[in-house]
């Protein structure tokens, strides 16, 4: 079942690449008492993710700050090494976005956002979405019907709905 507005996020351990290697990150700790945007992509460096989705949140970071958003987190089923390289290459980390890995797709499956696209080489990936989470509860959720577009889940679209 897909998570919906008004529901609490499940407890999840995601992974970030820290100074000493991969580090577990508690999503509950990231969202407790905070206003956080979480957006997910099917894959780092994939065409729409790289040229549209990530840049939309880099462009709009200051506007989210103005709306009281404490952190913008990008989640992907890639490993933390790929996420670090992608964050560096796009300027996402420099812009202040947090990139977290869901390497086993556990969080993605727990919220019902997993999908497979074998012809594109994408197995156990995340659907493209953006959500506003307030104190661990989803207050706004925008999910793309087609993983190859970024119409409702981009930074500008989420801002417009807030």
Image (tube, rainbow, N blue to C red):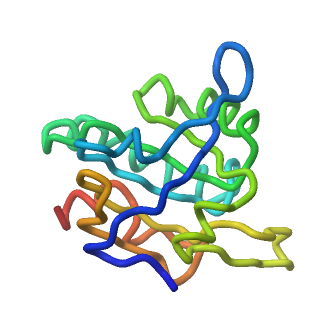
Residue at the front extreme of this rendering: 11
- Whole-percent x, y for residue 91 in the image: 52, 29
Q: Would residue 64 be found to the left or right of residue 102 on screen? A: left
Q: Is 26 in front, or is 20?
A: 26
Q: Which residue lies at the image location 62% right of the left edge and 35% below the top edge?
A: 24
Q: Which residue lies at the image location 75% right of the left edge and 56% below the top edge?
A: 104
Q: Is 106 in front, or is 120?
A: 106
- Give the vertical position of 85 relative to 143 (above or below): above
Q: Which residue lies at the image location 66% right of the left edge and 14% below the top edge?
A: 19
Quarter of the rendering containing residue 33? top left
Q: Would residue 146 be found to the left or right of residue 139 on screen? A: right
Position of the C terminus, as image quadrant, is: bottom left
- Whole-percent x, y for residue 55 in the image: 46, 45
- Give the vertical position of 41 relative to 55 (above or below): below
- Whole-percent x, y for residue 136 in the image: 32, 55
Quarter of the rendering containing residue 70? top left
Q: Which residue lies at the image location 67% right of the left edge and 27% below the top edge?
A: 17
Residue at the top extreme of this rendering: 19
Badge count = 0
Q: Would residue 152 be found to the left or right of residue 15 on screen? A: left
Q: Is 148 in front, or is 134?
A: 134
- Give the vertical position of 79 relative to 122 (above or below): above
- Whole-percent x, y for residue 128 in the image: 53, 68
């Amino acid at each position: 079942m897909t998570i919906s507005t008004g529901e609490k996020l499940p407890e999840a351990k995601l992974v970030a690449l820290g100074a000493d290697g991969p580090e577990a990150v508690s999503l509950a700790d990231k969202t407790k008492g905070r206003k956080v945007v979480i957006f997910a992509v099917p894959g780092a460096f994939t065409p729409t993710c790289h040229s549209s989705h990530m840049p939309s949140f880099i462009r709009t970071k200051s506007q989210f700050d103005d709306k009281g958003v404490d952190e913008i987190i990008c989640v992907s089923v890639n490993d933390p090494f790929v996420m670090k390289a992608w964050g560096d290459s796009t300027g996402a980390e420099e812009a202040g976005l947090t990139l977290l890995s869901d390497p086993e797709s556990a969080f993605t499956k727990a919220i019902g956002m997993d999908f497979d696209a074998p012809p594109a080489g994408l197995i156990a990936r995340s659907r493209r979405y953006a959500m506003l989470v307030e104190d661990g509860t989803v207050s706004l959720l925008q999910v793309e019907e087609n993983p190859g577009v970024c119409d409702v889940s981009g930074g500008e679209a989420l801002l417009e709905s807030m």
